[in-house]
Image (tube, grey):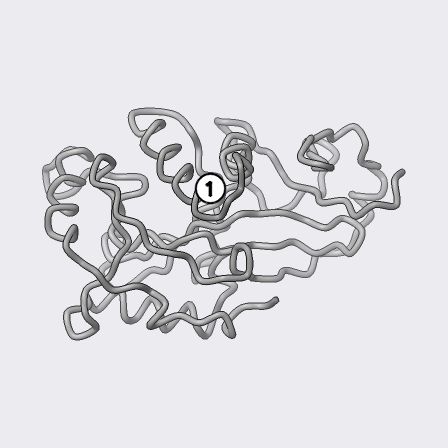
């Protein structure tokens, strides 16, 4: 096996729930070398005999994400002035600062799930990831990660339940030589506009239009409230 650093990334099926890492010989491994996943190059005995992995939580490309406002996608993750914050946003950011492990699982220990590229919002999801691919000069790497199942979503819950949850969107990878799994924060979906859902009798699309109309003029960046020192290098 090559001595070059190998990064194992898990690809789940479109119908199966996402798992953080693979330790069962019934699972499929994807070994990502030079951007070309090939699970056959990984030693099954090497993988299944590993100890529980160490998890590390980082910022994607080592920096706090840039907010975007995409009118054609009814998506924004800009923030209002602090005094106009919804309570769940303030509380959610506080929790993330003290518990970055929420990138990999919720407070109820629900594991981060694969962002699935299908259904009514397939192109919508891809277009938003494409914008972050462009901002990070990734030349399609993030799109490949999305299609291969390595973009994950978790959430920070609030007393309001699912309607008051921050969605955390991360890139998942694993260094199999060091047995370290990484969750790199790509962006936060503050308003549930990345993967819209039905609410209060409105369809997912109708609700997205309403929420976006209420939020589209926000101008503040998350940089004011989230710094890199919360995360590992």
Residue at 23% in and 52% down = 163
- Identify which residue, 68 or 151, lies in the foreground: 68
| Residue found at x 26% / y 57% | 78
**Residue in front for this viewpoint, 38 or 218:** 218
Looking at the image, residue 100 sits to the left or right of residue 86; the answer is right
In the rendered image, which quarter is residue 36 located in? top right
Name the residue: 47% across, 43% down: 113
Q: Is residue 97 above or below residue 14?
A: below
32 vs 221, nearest the viewer: 221
Under circle 1, the secondary element is: helix
Residue sticking out furthest to the top: 119
Percent of width and height locating residue 109: 48, 57
Q: Is residue 98 left or right of residue 91?
A: right
Does 58 sit above or below residue 167?
A: below
Residue 90 position within the rendered picture, expressed as x and y whole percent measured from the top left: 27, 70
Name the foreground residue: 182 vs 124: 124
Specify whether 216 is left or right of 25: left
On the rendered structure, is 49 left or right of 232?
Answer: right
Q: Residues within 10 Å of mark 1 (few under 14, many from 20)?
A: some
Q: Position of residue 144 (x, y in %)?
A: 54, 32
- Counting labels gives 1
Which of the image's four quarters has the C terminus? bottom right
Q: Label 1 belongs to which residue?
A: 133
Residue 226 image position (x, y, % from top left): 39, 70
Q: Image quadrant for the N terminus?
A: top right
């Amino acid at each position: 096996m090559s001595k070059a650093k190998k990064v194992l990334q898990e690809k789940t099926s479109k119908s199966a729930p996402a798992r953080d890492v693979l330790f069962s010989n019934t699972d499929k491994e994807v070994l990502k070398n030079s951007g070309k996943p090939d699970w056959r190059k990984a030693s099954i005995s090497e993988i299944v005999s590993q100890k529980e992995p160490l998890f590390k939580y980082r910022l994607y490309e080592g920096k706090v994400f840039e907010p975007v406002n995409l009118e054609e996608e009814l998506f924004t993750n800009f923030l209002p002035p602090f005094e106009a914050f919804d309570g769940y946003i303030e509380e959610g950011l506080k929790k993330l600062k003290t518990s970055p492990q929420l990138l990999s699982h919720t407070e109820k220990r629900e594991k981060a799930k694969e962002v699935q590229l299908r259904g009514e919002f397939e192109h919508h999801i891809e277009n938003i990831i494409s914008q972050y691919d462009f901002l990070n000069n990734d030349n399609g790497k993030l799109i490949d990660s999305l299609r291969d199942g390595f973009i994950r979503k978790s959430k920070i819950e609030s007393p309001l339940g699912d309607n008051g949850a921050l969605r955390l969107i991360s890139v998942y990878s694993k260094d199999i030589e060091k047995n370290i799994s990484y969750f790199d924060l790509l962006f936060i979906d503050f308003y549930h506009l990345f993967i819209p859902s039905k609410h209060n009798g409105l369809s997912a699309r109708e609700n997205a239009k309403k929420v976006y109309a209420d939020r589209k003029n926000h101008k503040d960046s998350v940089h004011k409230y989230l710094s890199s020192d919360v995360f590992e290098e």
